[in-house]
Structures are given as C-alpha cells and as structure tokens.
Amino acid sequence: MDLTLYADSAWQSPWVFHAMVALEELGLKYKVEAKKLPLSVDERHRIQEHAFLGKVPCLVHGDFWLTESAAISEYLGEAFAPPQYPRIMPADPKQRARARQVMSWLRTSLHALREDRPTSSVFQRPVTKPMSEKGRQDASELVRIAEQLVAPGKTTLFDDWCIADADLALALMRLIANSDTSMTQRLIEYGLAQWGRTSVRRYLAYIPTTP
C-alpha cells in the first residue's frame, strides 16, 4: 500500500489532523512526510506539479496526489470502502449530507474563535488571553449548534462514528482545553470521548513537547 501524507512539522494544522485521523480510523499503513511551513518554493512547486494546489495536507496514493482535507477523507472512504474497511462517512444519505454540512461549516466559519483559541492552545499549551467579542460570539454559535447536533448521552454525531466527529470535537476542544465556562457538561463529555480515540491519540503523539 503506497500511501504518504504530507503534514506540517509543527503539527498545528486542523486539516492535517483530519486527514491523519481518517487514515488511522481506516487502519491503513502510510508514511508521514513532515514539512516546515511555509513550504519552501521547491516543495510548494513539487506538490503543485502533482496536486495543483501547493499546500498540506497532501495525500499521495501511488501516482495520485490530492490536497484539501475533506477531499482526502472522502477519497479514502471510497477507495478503502466497507466491508474490508470501516466506514468513515455515514451510510445513510441524510446523515452523510449532514456530516458534509458540519465539515464545510467548520472550514468556512468561526474565524475569530480560531484566532483567539488556535490549535496550539489545544495541542500544546492553553492561552490566558481573554477572548475577543467576535470570538465570544463564535463560541456561542459553536455551542448552540453542537448542542443541536449531539443528542444527550451520545458521544458521536450519529449511530456510528464518522470523520465529522473529529472536526467537531477539535472545534469544541478550543473551548474545553482553555477551560471556557460556556461549555456544557455533555459537550465536554462528547469532546473528551473523541479525544480518547486511538486515532486522535496517535496524531497527538507526533506533536513535539514544549519547554
């Protein structure tokens, strides 16, 4: 199996996180090529030559190169499909559409929250800086929507885990890891349940420790 994932060497990208969790959940063997960001001109051009967009994450499967995390997980879920491999997207078309909606929303929204509570505050060290007004509005919106998405007593969005769970959990961990008081107990339980998955722990094991 000839799979390589190009990642950022600081391990701060939520989208590298998404791609690696997908690979791990599928139980695939793959290599990691960690690159310092911003990419060098040569590295960017090399990826552009094959995948058109010179960025990470970039998945290489044989002679096929692909960027954009959601496209990577969709490809993996179809190329390595049941029954030989577990599902990483829901089988039900309505649930699958909802998962795509959640992933698209998290990639295009909550910009102030992402600025105020970066992934470094989740993966490495919490921040103490107060959240901006726009960040607080984003946090409230995230909690409101997550409360609607995650049913009481559930630790997955749907009956079974899907890759959208990883994305939503990471968004919530921006608040959980920084001890935000707006979080509800059931969302904390949901986020921590996701954080305990083997796929997530394997990603976290790559992150360099800080002094």
Image (spheres, rainbow, N blue to C red):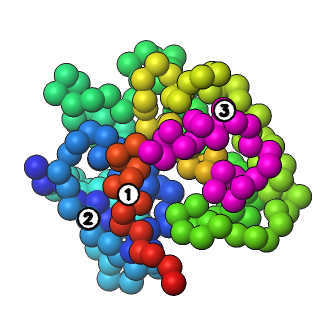
Q: Does the magenta stretch include residue 182?
A: yes
Q: Quadrant of residue 36?
A: bottom left
Cα distance between the residues tagged 2 and 1: 11 Å
Quadrant in the rendering for residue 86: top left
- Do the numbered discs 1 and 3 sit on residues whose CB atoms are within 8 Å? no
Q: How many marks?
A: 3
Location of residue 46 with respect to 30 vertically, above or below: below
| Category of crowding for the residue at label 3, using alpha-carbon neighbours closer than 10 angstroms: few (below 14), some (14–19), many (at least 20) | some
To which residue does mark 1 refer? 203
Q: What residue type is labelled 2?
A: Val
Question: Do we see residue 193 in this rendering?
Answer: yes
Q: Give the range drawn in magenta.
A: 175-196
Q: Are marks 3 and 2 in contact (CB under 8 Å)?
A: no
Q: In terms of sequence position, does the residue under pointer 2 or pointer 1 come before the other?
A: 2
Q: Name the residue under label 3.
A: 186
Secondary structure under the numbered disc 1 in the rendered image? helix
Upstream in sequence: badge 1 or badge 3: 3
